[in-house]
Amino acid sequence: MRIQVTRTGGFAGRTLRAELDTVERIDAPHVHALAREAVAGAARTPGYGVPDGYHYAIAVDGRTVHCADPSLTDSQRELVSLVLHQGVTLPPG
């Protein structure tokens, strides 16, 4: 499973993108469950969060959903953190 997270917004307005491939991960079943929960609890179109808050686009195997601080579910927060910290950083785009 390929999971891509794009974080936009924040005080500086900087875009951060990362991708995680779960093929060889020992914790792949846990990450897959997180991804399913995160996608199920998100909107298909971008929404509004709080001023200077982060907005996220989460793409799981080609399906993209959107969420924003402070309204992330626990699974969205954990998945976003995992991908942005352990995934491969991609150029903004």
Image (tube, helix red, strand yellow):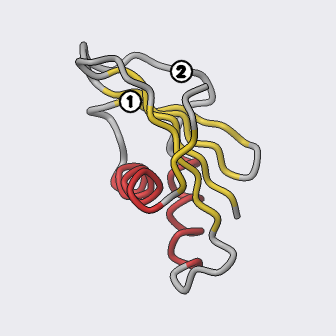
Is 74 drawn above or below residue 92 in the view shown? Answer: below
Sequence order check, earlier mark of 1 and 2? 2
Q: Which residue is mark 2?
A: 46
Q: Name the amino acid, label 1.
A: Ala
Q: Which mark is residue 79?
A: none
Location of residue 50 in the rendering, given as x and y in whole percent from the top left corner: 26, 18
Total of numbered circles in the picture? 2
Residue at the outermost bottom position: 26
Helix, strand or loop at label 1? It is strand
Query: Residue shown at 51%/58% (left/top)?
Result: 87
Is 40 drawn above or below residue 9 in the view shown? Answer: below
Query: Residue shown at 27%/23% (left/top)?
Result: 53
Location of residue 89 in the rendering, given as x and y in whole percent from the top left corner: 51, 47
Location of residue 4 in the rendering, given as x and y in whole percent from the top left corner: 60, 47
Q: Residues within 10 Å of mark 2 (few under 14, many from 20)?
A: some
Query: Residue shown at 70%/64% (left/top)?
Result: 1
- Is 33 placed left or right of 10 in the picture? right
Q: CA distance from mark 1 to mark 2?
A: 8 Å
Q: Residues within 10 Å of mark 1 (few under 14, many from 20)?
A: many
Is 33 drawn above or below residue 91 in the view shown? Answer: below
Q: Which mark is residue 68?
A: 1
Q: Are marks 1 and 2 in contact (CB under 8 Å)?
A: yes
The C terminus - image quarter: top right
- Residue 85 quadrant: bottom left
Q: Name the amino acid, label 2.
A: Pro
